Amino acid sequence: MVFLDSFHTVAEPLVRYFLGIFFLMIGLQFTSRSLGLYARMGYSFINYGERASAGWWHRNIFNVFRGLILAAVVARIFVDIDPWLGVFDSLYYGPVLVTGMVFLMFSFSLVNYLQAFMHDQWRSGVDPKQDRQLLTDGPFSRSRNPVFITVMLGQLGFFLALPSVFSLVCLIAGVTVLVRQARVEEKALAELFGDAYEAYRRRVPRWL
């Protein structure tokens, strides 16, 4: 018991600062990478779709929650806002917090690996103008949506690193949006690749 208390004393501020820095750096990395790709290629790799379409709503909802998460994790470095976030005291212990931190780092590494694996075929959202081949090997031979699974793992990690009503709402909203977006993107792929995608869909599960 003494060990757990001591571990929590060290882990709690570590994870608190980690969350603020982690989400700030993710925002900077994603923005700078997108700007660099646009400057190099002359077109955006981020696609919202038509205004008020399902993909457009999914992207904007995701952005709202991303902004709220970033604001919350940075603010709590300087101000005690945990009572406003509805922290679950029964889960707010060192081992749980560190497990969440590990999940976030693992998810971040996997997302970067998968995006690198996709190379210039990577897109955020549906790009109707993209001339691309159907990826069916590597991670995509085991799941049709490995990137979304990995992002969900990160969302679970955020909940564990900050177990609260706020992070639980973010987790539920995030998973819901990703599941719906997966359907939107798979419909677009089916229209683009026809029988080849249907054969792939029958062979490889949507998730695991």
Image (tube, rainbow, N blue to C red):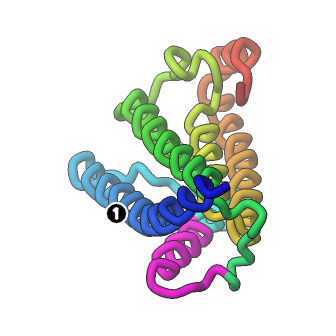
Q: Label 1, on which residue?
A: 28
Q: State yes or no: residue 79 in magenta.
A: yes
Look at 61% across and 61% down and name the residue there: 5
- Nearest to the observer: residue 176 or residue 72: 72
User: Residue at coordinates 54% horizontally, 56% vertically from top-left?
Assistant: 7
Q: Nearer the viewer, residue 98 or 208?
A: 98
Along the line of sight, which residue is nearer the eye, 65 or 24?
24
Relative image position of residue 142 (x, y in whole percent) = 63, 18
| Residue 125 coordinates in the image, percent (x, y) | 55, 49
Residue 167 drawn at (x, y percent): 68, 65
Is residue 103 located in the magenta-colored stretch of the structure?
no
Relative to residue 206, is residue 147 depicted above or below?
Answer: below
Residue 178 appears anywhere in the view: yes
Above or below residue 124? Residue 76 is below
Q: Tell me, yes or no, if residue 158 can be seen here.
A: no
Q: Is residue 205 above or below residue 3?
A: above
94 on left or right of 180? left
Q: Quadrant of the C terminus?
A: top right
Q: In this picture, which residue range is highlighted in magenta?
A: 63-82
Residue ID at (61%, 51%): 95
- Number of marks present in the image shown: 1
Farthest residue toward the front? 2
Which amino acid, by three-letter code, is at mark 1? Leu
Camera-nearest residue between 27 and 39 = 27
Picture quarter with the N terminus:
bottom right
